[in-house]
Amino acid sequence: MENTFKPRCCGIWSALSKEQLNFADIINEFIDNARAAAATRITVHLVQTDTDEFSLEVTDDGYGMAREDFDQIFSVGALRGALAYKRCGMGLKVALANADPENLSWEIRTKTTNGECSYIGAPYAEQMAFESLNPKELKSLRRSGTIISSMLSRSVFERGLEGTESDEERIAMLVEILRVTYAPLLPKEQQEEEDSHLSIQLLWTPLLGQEQAIDLTALSPIWVQQNVGYDRANIVKHDSEVYAQYTFGKINPMPENWRFYRGDRKSAGLMVYLHGRLVQYGIFSEIWNCENPRQNDFLFVVSLNGVVTKLPLCNGGKTQLKIEDTKVHDFLRWVQQTCPEPLKG
C-alpha cells in the first residue's frame, strides 16, 4: 500500500505507557527529539480544554522527519541525532505512549528542508500510514520543523508535579524544571536570545484565563564560594575526547524554589549535564562516602561534552546515570578526586 510504513516492535505501546514518565519528562523527551534534529527554537503550547483535559503541542524548527526514515524513527530502538542522551532510541515513542496511553490522539506534522510535508497520527500500529500535506497547511513551520501534539488527562498533567495545590503552581514548577534541565543552553538573565544555543517558549492557557507566554531563561545557582574549572584529559580514563566544564562550592540556598538549589539533601551534591541536558542531580554519598546532611549548601555542577560513544551512559528515561557503565564509575571517581572534601569549610 502506498504511503505506508512498518515500525519494528510496534506491539508494545501498552508496555511503553507503563513507564510512567513525569509530565516534565514527557516534554523533555519532545524537546530532546527536536534538539536531535538540530532545532534551536522550540515552543511548548499547553491548553486546558476542560476541567480534567489538556492539549499539548510542541513545535520546533529542526530539519523535520523524512519519509524514508519513518520506519526507523517509529521503531523501538531507533537512534536520531548525535546527542549522548539520545542513544537509547526510546524517547519519542515512550513520550507519546505516556502522553496518550490509549493510543488515540497523538499527531505529528513535519516539514523537511526540501519542503516535503507529512502527517502521521494515532494509532501506533503494525502498519502505519502517512499523508502528504500542502505546505500551506504548515505555515507555522518556516523552512522546516516538526509539530508533535496530543491530548492529556489530568493524571498525566499532574504526574511528577506533586506538592502543588493549583495548576498555576504546577506550571511554575514545570517552568523551573525546564529552566534547570536546559540551563547551559538557554539564555541567561539579561542576555540576548541570539547569544544562546536554544530558545524555548512556554505558552499556557488555563480553562478560564488568557494565554500566558513565558520565554525561558537559564535558572542557575547563586554561588557564595566557587571553584571553576575545565578538564579535557582526565575524566574517562584519560580520554581527550571527553571534556568537562564545572563549578563547585557553596551556594546561597533558595528555599522558595520547588526542587533545585534549595540547600537541602535532595538538591545538594553533584548535578550532571550531557551535551547541555540535565540527566541527574542530588548525587552525594555515592561519591564521597559520607552522609548527606539534611541541610547542605554544597553543589558540584558539571557539563560533559565530546564524542558521544566516549561519554558516560544514562538510563532510558534520562533521569540518572547508568551505574553499571564503567565510564560512569570513571567519571564519579574524577569528581571525587577533583573535590575530595565537599563539606570542608
Image (cartoon, helix red, strand yellow):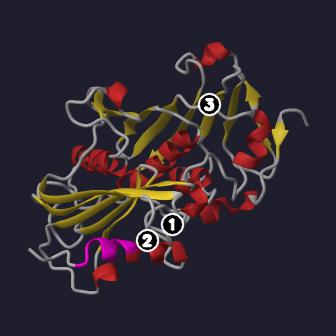
The magenta stretch is 334-340
Residue 101 can be seen in this image: no
Give 166 or 254, whichever is nearer the viewer.
Answer: 254
Q: What separation in Å lies between label 1 and label 2 (alpha carbons)? A: 7 Å
Is 161 colored magenta in this rendering?
Answer: no
Circles 1, 2 touching at the beta carbon (< 8 Å): yes
Q: Where does label 2 land, which residue?
A: 331
Look at 48% across and 64% down and name the residue there: 20
Residue 270 in percent (x, y) is at 30, 67
Above or below for 259 versus 344: above
Badge 1 or badge 2: first in the primary sequence: 1
Q: Tell me the tag on residue 312.
A: 1
Q: What separation in Å lies between label 3 and label 1 (alpha carbons)? A: 27 Å
Q: Where does label 3 land, which residue?
A: 63
Q: Tell me the tag on residue 259.
A: none
Is 335 colored magenta in this rendering?
Answer: yes
Tell me the quarter of the picture where residue 190 sits: top left
Look at 46% across and 39% down and name the residue there: 56
Residue 22 in percent (x, y) is at 41, 58
**Type of the residue with mark 1:** Pro
Quadrant for the N terminus, please: top right
Look at 55% across and 66% down and name the residue there: 18
